[in-house]
Image: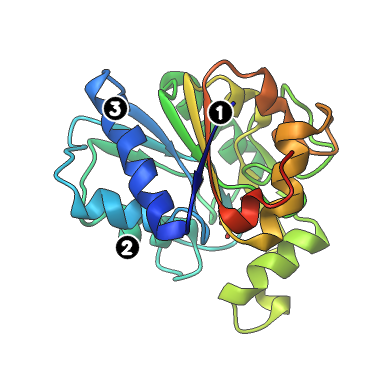
Amino acid sequence: MKVIRVANENDGGKEALKVFEAALANGARTFGLATGGTPETTYKELVASDLDFSRCTSVNLDEYVGLGPDDPQSYNYYMRTRLFDAKPFKANYLPDGLAADPDAEVARYNEVIAAHPVDLQLLGIGRNGHIGFNEPGSPVDGKVRKIKLTESTIEANARYFDNEADVPQYAYSMGIGQIMAAKQILLEAFGDKKADAIAAMVDGPVTPEVPASILQRHPNVTVIVDEAAAAKLK
Ligand code: PGA
């Protein structure tokens, strides 16, 4: 893992922009994208840049079950307002939170991912070490599935909702096996709440209890961390 330390998340976004620029220049055309607080500065940099994604495809990591594209808490809405409205892609794929048949939706999204091998996958990390919504104990060879979110994740994501009770209990998420299949991975983490997870991911043993630790076995991972998130690294 290549660890890049930055002073703050604004600088983190600037470093991430460089990774996207280099990937595009090297022919990357399929981008695995993430939501949440972490990639906000990266998307701001991408929007402000002159990068052209019109011949590119995006495949998002996850979506809440039960939220449609017009719901401001949905990841579909997030992606349109943070990136896609300003930077059109050839195609954007996300799980459909309103799908009537969850099993069919899981099968559909697995096909989407199989048809669009990811060149560069952007990731955040949960306080419990999750990647996507692959919570501790998730299978390392896993594919898309409907996942019950842990209390820790619901609590962390409650800040975006009026009440904790409004946070969906389930999400569709790409599996760890599919994340590991990306040619290149860029993981970002900012703030002291991520320090334990970052230390466990980089310096700890590879274990399903820290889903991100499997990234130690991926040949091309860049980690961008601010000082607070890096505080517990060896
Ligand atoms: P955050 O979430 O970017 O909102 O902190 C990251 C994650 O849970 O993967």
Residue at which label 1 appears: 110
Q: Which residue is drawn at the image coordinates 54% and 54% (left, top)?
A: 97
Disc 3 is placed on an element classified as helix
Give residue 42's mark.
Answer: none
Residue at which label 2 appears: 81
Circle 3 packing at 10 Å, graded few (<14), some (14-19), many (20+), is few
Residue 148 visible in this rendered orientation of the protein: no
Q: Which residue is drawn at the image coordinates 43% and 20% (left, top)?
A: 115
Discs 2, 3 touching: Cβ within 8 Å = no
Q: Distance between the residues labelled 2 and 1?
A: 25 Å
Q: Which residue is drawn at the image coordinates 68% and 52% (left, top)?
A: 231
Residue 1: where, in percent of width, then height?
59, 26
Q: In this view, does 182 lie above or below 39?
A: above
The mark lying in front, picked from 1 and 3, is: 3
The mark lying in front, picked from 2 and 1, is: 2
* Outermost residue, top side: 219
Q: Which amino acid does label 2 sit on?
A: Thr
Q: Nearer the viewer, residue 210 or 163?
A: 210
In the rendered structure, the answer to whether residue 52 lies left or right of residue 192 reads: left
Q: Which of marks 1 and 3 is nearer the N terminus?
A: 3
Mark 3 CB in 8 Å range of ligand 1?
A: no
